[in-house]
Image (cartoon, rainbow, N blue to C red):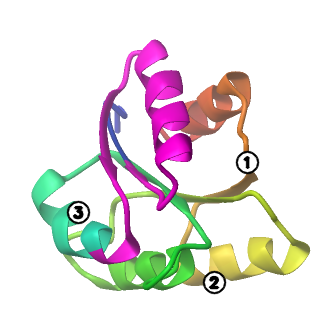
């Protein structure tokens, strides 16, 4: 599967902007949302090829949103990368249990993100 459209989900406007700029520089189409709830509600309609989501958000966390997406037949095939500024070993374990394909530390570098996306595509 070729990855062209990426959905970014983060409650930080700064992080959404950073990731949008980085991904657009790499040639991807980007859609950004600011909450786990918005992601769960809109992902099936947006149909991204990949979702990059913050773990720690108010309301629905990245873990909870990922779990919901991976259980829904309409979105179960969309790979999710979780990210956090305060990544811990337990986060890596939980990310996998919730269905995420990767879990990365913020701020993620362009080269690191490119490698992960290429592996998923």
Task: Check disc 3 and report the residue beneath it.
Answer: 43
Magenta-highlighted residues: 8-37
- Tag 1's secondary structure? loop
The Cα atoms of the two marked residues, 3 and 1, are separated by 23 Å
2 or 3: mark nearer the eye: 3
Q: Are marks 2 and 1 in contact (CB under 8 Å)?
A: no
- Indicate whether 15 appears above or below 75: above
**Where in the figure is residue 28, as x and y percent of width and height?**
36, 24
2 or 1: mark nearer the eye: 1
Q: Earlier in the sequence, mark 3 or mark 1?
A: 3
Task: Check disc 2 and report the residue beneath it.
Answer: 97
- Tag 2's secondary structure? helix
Residue pictured at 54% horizontal, 42% vertical: 14
**Where in the figure is residue 10, as x and y percent of width and height?**
48, 58
Task: Check disc 1 and report the residue beneath it.
Answer: 106
Residue pictured at 39% horizontal, 16% vertical: 27
């Amino acid at each position: 599967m070729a990855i062209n459209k990426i959905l970014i989900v983060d409650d930080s406007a700064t992080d959404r902007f950073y990731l949008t700029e980085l991904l657009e520089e790499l040639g991807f189409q980007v859609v950004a949302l600011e909450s786990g709830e918005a992601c769960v509600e809109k992902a099936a309609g947006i149909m991204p090829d990949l979702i990059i989501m913050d773990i720690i958000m108010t309301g629905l966390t990245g873990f909870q949103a990922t779990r919901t997406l991976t259980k829904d037949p309409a979105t179960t095939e969309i790979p999710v990368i979780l990210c956090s500024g305060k990544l811990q070993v337990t986060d890596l374990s939980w990310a996998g249990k919730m269905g995420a394909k990767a879990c990365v530390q913020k701020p993620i570098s362009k080269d690191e993100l490119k490698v992960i996306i290429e592996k998923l595509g």
